Image: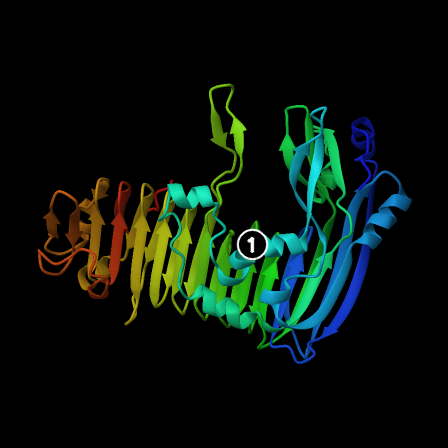
């Protein structure tokens, strides 16, 4: 890749924006699954189509110094497709990837680029088995940081077989260096800023937006930055999305190593893992701090149970049916429990976060609710007031205190099969509120 002088890159970066539309019809070729990989910034909308072909309509966009170079950059972004027996073995089509920012000998930012095949060799286990992509140091320091669902691996293994492999690829990385705060409004979506030193920002340019219509019944796996999926009769897996919304899915759904701002109307099971905390930034010479904000995620109307394992998020859960586990290690979880069906089991866990249950008053009389805490705080007055006798069973020893609406005083607080709602925290806060009351902020 030619090294462009820094002053030239700064000057050229914001000159020209070019777009190009495209249309593709890709037959399934007997495939049972569809796997889509995007090597650059991407917005993917998934919808349903009749027939046995994947129909793609989209737009490529880029920044460039001249119309001619913009056309060259757009031609460099390609859509490739073929059928593979096992995606876990092949991985995506070869492509160059932007991995971050390095510095040259003068301290100027330059692109850290790599190949998709290198990514697949180093991280294939994370992407195709659901193993959390944690560093070795993270695992050594926090061996219990990740506790993903055991259902992820068999689901992904099946969805990698007999797959239609679709990849958005490019042969070159197109990075830009621009003065901080100088990105034109129309160009902001075309640049992924990775590094800033207070004066200059460095990042990757180029974006693809596309609507992908898939036949009903096949499994769908998507590796892209931003995904919206709706109205599908398919099992669906999203790998490492930065943002996503998922609604009206007649099938099982998994979001791996990523965020789903809104998940609603899922007839099957929902599984999620999400452990990223972002980068680090110097804090006025005092030290370093995390740069990422805490995202809010809403899970609503999931019919087949759920297993959510995340590190730090604001979660709002409502109308979750079946066996549900939500583990939010550091963040805030609000569970709205307005109804209860036979077989529903809700388990909420945190280490040092906050859990709030907004509970219907009649259910407080009917359900077996247990709150267990090691070294944190449990606010029980509201739960007691919801009950006619105003009383709760409770127990305490040197390791655990617990409160329950029903059950033997000495019964184990962690006996999950005997509880309709079980809340467990190490050093966090548990609060119960009547559903009729105005909601208090989760944070």
x%, y% of residue 442?
Answer: 37, 43
Q: Is residue 412 above or below residue 197?
A: below
x%, y% of residue 410?
Answer: 9, 56
Q: Does 46 sit left or right of 95 as displayed?
A: left
Colour scheme of this structure image? rainbow
* Res 436 visible: no
Location of the C terminus (image quadrant): top left
Q: Which residue is mark 1?
A: 123
Q: Does 316 sit left or right of 2 as displayed?
A: left
At 50% across and 23% down in the image, what residue appears?
Answer: 283
Q: Is residue 219 above or below residue 1?
A: below
Q: Does 251 sit left or right of 35 as displayed?
A: left
- Residue lying furthest top: 285
* Res 131 visible: yes
- For the residue labelled by badge 1, is the local secondary structure a helix, a strand or a loop? helix
x%, y% of residue 139?
Answer: 41, 46
Q: Nearer the viewer, residue 339 or 436?
A: 339
Number of numbered tags placed on the structure image: 1
Location of the N terminus (image quadrant): top right
Q: Does 413 sit left or right of 280 as displayed?
A: left
At 21% across and 57% down in the image, what residue appears?
Answer: 414
At 67% across and 54% down in the image, what residue appears?
Answer: 116
């Amino acid at each position: 890749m030619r090294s462009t002088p820094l002053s030239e890159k700064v000057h050229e970066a914001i000159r020209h924006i070019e777009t190009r539309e495209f249309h593709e019809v890709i037959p399934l070729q007997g495939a049972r699954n569809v796997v889509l990989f995007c090597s650059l910034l991407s917005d993917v909308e998934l919808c349903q189509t009749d027939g046995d072909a994947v129909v793609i309509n989209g737009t490529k966009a880029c920044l460039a110094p001249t119309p001619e170079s913009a056309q060259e950059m757009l031609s460099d972004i390609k859509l490739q497709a073929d059928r593979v027996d096992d995606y876990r073995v092949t991985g995506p089509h070869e492509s160059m990837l932007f991995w971050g920012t390095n510095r040259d000998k003068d301290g100027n930012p330059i692109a850290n680029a790599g190949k998709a095949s290198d990514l697949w060799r180093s991280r294939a286990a994370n992407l195709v088995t659901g193993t959390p992509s944690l560093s070795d140091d993270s695992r050594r320091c926090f061996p219990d940081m990740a506790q993903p669902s055991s259902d992820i691996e068999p689901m992904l293994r099946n969805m990698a077989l007999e797959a239609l492999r679709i990849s958005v690829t490019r042969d070159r990385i197109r990075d830009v260096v621009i003065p901080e705060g100088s990105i034109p409004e129309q160009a902001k979506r075309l640049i992924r800023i990775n590094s800033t030193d207070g004066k200059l920002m460095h990042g990757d340019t180029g974006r693809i937006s596309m609507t992908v219509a898939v036949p009903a019944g096949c499994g769908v796996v998507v590796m892209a930055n931003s995904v919206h999926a709706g109205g599908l009769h398919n099992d669906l897996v999203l790998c490492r999305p930065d943002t996503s919304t998922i609604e009206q899915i007649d099938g099982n759904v998994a979001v791996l190593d990523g965020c789903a701002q809104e998940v609603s109307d899922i007839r099957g099971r929902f599984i999620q893992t999400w452990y990223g905390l972002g980068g680090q930034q110097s804090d006025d010479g005092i030290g370093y701090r995390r740069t990422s904000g805490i995202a809010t995620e809403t899970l609503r109307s999931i019919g087949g149970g759920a297993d959510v394992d995340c590190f730090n998020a604001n979660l709002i859960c409502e109308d979750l049916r079946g066996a549900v586990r939500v583990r939010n290690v550091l963040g805030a979880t609000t569970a709205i429990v307005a109804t209860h069906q036979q077989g529903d089991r809700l388990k909420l866990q945190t280490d040092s976060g906050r859990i709030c249950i907004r509970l219907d008053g009649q259910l407080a009389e009917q359900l077996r609710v247990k709150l267990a805490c090691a070294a944190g705080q449990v606010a029980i007055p509201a739960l007691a007031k919801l009950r006619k006798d105003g009383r709760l069973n409770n127990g305490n020893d040197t390791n655990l205190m617990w409160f329950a609406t029903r059950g033997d005083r000495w019964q184990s607080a962690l006996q999950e099969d005997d509880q309709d709602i079980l809340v467990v925290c190490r050093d966090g806060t548990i609060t119960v509120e009547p559903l009729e009351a105005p909601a208090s902020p989760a944070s």
